[in-house]
Image (cartoon, grey):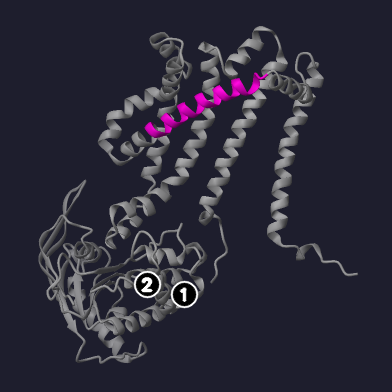
């Protein structure tokens, strides 16, 4: 098992208008097996944070570690992107297999079949991504990340491009799969309702520069399993917005 | 007895025969245009298709046809192979590095702008009237074209897919083979078809200018003899061979890129 710990993260991007601080003094701790959501407006550096954690972004200040991880190197990471990012020239089966190895083996084939069933795509194994609906493509991308049996799963707004009905069913599926695997999950989202429905804790992030400004612990307040129609979800999501609003600078009126 | 309505026929078969029919019609229109031209100009000035084919058969019986077509084809393939190897290598490099792109920009622009016959003439003068000079000249003519197309191919690569593969910790070899190459493949095929077609056209020039064998030489020979049948016969033979090669490449491409065909969504 492995948790996530970030200490004093700072990330500066070079731009034509000079350096831009995207993340400033970000400290966060996710316990092993915990589901944490980072909630913030667009452009607050949420995806940059995930890119740093996943190792895609290596140029930053501060420290990232995975406490509780006993093996060598780094824990197994799964990453689900905002768009499915499937390889269009590969079938569904090949796309999931891609995460495991370069050349197929019978043992991996059985694992792929198992995951195809778990995400309800067993009948679509030889379809190409452009033959599937967006929701199905997202399920393939989820299976591709989960087949690795990740100790840490990073979710970058994976439901934001879906219609609400599909997103709702996908959220349920993610929770089911998490219950089985019990890995550590860090979800970034700009949807307050989604954050409180899925997470044990919600970290609230403000922009310019991106930093964590508040935290909402739901463990005692919203027991699992949760009902997406639960009225308390609405109240808690409003609470996250209230925590974020003093840090929002909308236009010149708010900024002045 | 009941007959099936036309609409009950499988749509795919109907489309296939329709597309085949259109292609045959296109081919037939070329033959008709040729016949018409021959009829208008007179058969001694522009021999018709039948006379040209008869001349081809005679050349074949004399053992001349495949000798010259073979040597031209060999030159085309050598020039094409060297061009693709060099062009793809340089194209990928300049596509990946802005610095290299700027460093080689003047070379590429000059290569594209220079009259195509010039490198051939210069190579014949510098190296001599031999195959080495012809091949070097051809490669100089063809490489800039390939470089430009491959550079565009590299720039069109979807980096988000590469990022996905890196996030899943896929080895570099797998990323190149399964993520980068499939994206480059359509550019590679397009470039190869273009380079093959241009190399055949330029080889004929090279042979006409300074070789004593090959289709270009034969065309020049029959030009000196005012024998239009010979000119058309060798042109036809080479066109047929290259068209067959091109169609094979196209068919292979259609097989390899079947995932790009527009399809109906399942849901």
Residue A144 position (above or below residue B126)? below
- Any magenta on residue B84? yes
Residue A124 against residue B199 in the figure, above or below: below
* Whole-number angstrom distance, CA of label 2 to CA of label 1: 10 Å
Asked whether residue A160 is in view, the answer is no
Q: What's the residue at 34%, 62% (across, down)?
A: A101
Say if mark 2 contacts mark 1, CB within 8 Å.
yes
Residue under circle 2?
A143
Crowd band around label 1 with a 10 angstrom C-alpha radius: few (<14), some (14–19), many (20+) = some
Outermost residue to the right: B1
Q: Residue at x 15, y 58 (%)?
A: A11
In the figure, residue B231 lies in which quadrant? Answer: top right
User: What is the total number of numbered labels drawn onto the structure image?
Assistant: 2
Q: Could you tell me residue A144's position as x and y percent?
A: 36, 69
- Looking at the image, residue B50 sits to the left or right of residue A205; the answer is right
- The chain that hosts pointer 1 is A
Question: In the image, A171: left or right of A41?
Answer: right
Q: Residues within 10 Å of mark 2 (few under 14, many from 20)?
A: many
Q: Is residue A107 visible?
A: yes
Residue range highlighted in magenta: B63-86
Residue A121 tag number: 1
């Amino acid at each position: 098992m492995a948790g996530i710990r970030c200490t004093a993260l700072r990330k500066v991007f070079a731009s034509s208008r000079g350096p831009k601080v995207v993340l400033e003094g970000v400290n966060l701790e996710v316990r092993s097996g915990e589901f944490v959501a980072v909630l913030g407006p667009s452009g607050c550096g949420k995806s940059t944070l995930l890119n740093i954690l996943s190792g895609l972004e290596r140029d930053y200040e501060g420290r990232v570690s995975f406490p509780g991880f006993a093996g060598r190197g780094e824990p197994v990471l799964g990453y689900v992107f905002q768009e499915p990012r499937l390889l269009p020239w590969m079938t569904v089966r090949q796309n999931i297999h891609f995460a495991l190895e370069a050349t197929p083996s019978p043992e991996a084939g059985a694992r792929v079949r198992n995951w195809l069933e778990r995400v309800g795509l067993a009948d679509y194994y030889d379809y190409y991504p452009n033959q599937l609906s967006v929701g199905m493509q997202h399920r393939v991308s989820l299976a591709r990340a989960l087949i690795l049996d990740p100790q840490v799963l990073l979710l970058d707004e994976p439901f934001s491009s879906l219609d609400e009905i599909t997103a709702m069913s996908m959220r349920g599926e993610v929770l089911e799969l998490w219950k089985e695997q019990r890995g550590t999950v860090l979800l970034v989202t700009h949807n307050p309702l989604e954050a409180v429905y899925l997470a044990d804790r919600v970290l609230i992030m403000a922009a310019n520069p991106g930093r964590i400004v508040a935290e909402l612990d739901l463990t005692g307040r919203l027991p699992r399993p949760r009902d997406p129609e639960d009225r308390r979800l609405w109240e808690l999501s409003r609470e996250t917005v209230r925590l974020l609003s003093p840090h929002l600078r909308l236009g010149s009126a708010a900024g002045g | 007895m009941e007959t099936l309505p036309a609409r009950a026929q499988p749509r795919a078969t109907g489309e296939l025969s329709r597309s085949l029919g259109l292609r045959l019609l296109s081919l037939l229109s070329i033959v008709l245009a040729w016949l018409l031209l021959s009829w208008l100009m007179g058969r001694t000035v522009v021999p018709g298709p039948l006379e040209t084919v008869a001349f081809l058969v005679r050349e074949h019986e004399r053992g001349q046809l495949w000798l010259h077509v073979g040597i031209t084809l060999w030159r085309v393939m050598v020039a094409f192979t060297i061009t693709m190897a060099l062009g793809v290598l340089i194209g990928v490099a300049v596509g990946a590095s802005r610095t290299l792109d700027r460093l080689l920009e003047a070379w590429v622009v000059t290569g594209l702008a220079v009259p195509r016959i010039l490198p051939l003439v210069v190579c014949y003068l510098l190296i001599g009237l031999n195959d080495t000079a012809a091949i070097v000249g051809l490669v100089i003519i063809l490489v800039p074209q390939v470089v430009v197309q491959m550079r565009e191919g590299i720039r069109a690569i979807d980096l988000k897919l590469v990022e996905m593969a890196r996030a899943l910790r896929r080895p570099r070899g797998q990323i190149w083979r399964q993520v980068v190459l499939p994206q480059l493949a359509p550019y590679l095929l397009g470039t190869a078809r273009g380079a093959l077609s241009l190399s055949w056209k330029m080889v004929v020039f090279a042979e006409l200018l300074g070789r004593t064998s090959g289709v270009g030489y034969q065309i020049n020979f029959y030009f000196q003899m005012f024998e239009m049948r010979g000119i058309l016969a060798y042109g036809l033979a080479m066109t047929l061979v290259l068209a067959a090669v091109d169609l094979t490449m196209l068919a292979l491409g259609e097989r390899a890129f079947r995932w790009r065909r527009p399809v109906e969504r399942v849901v």
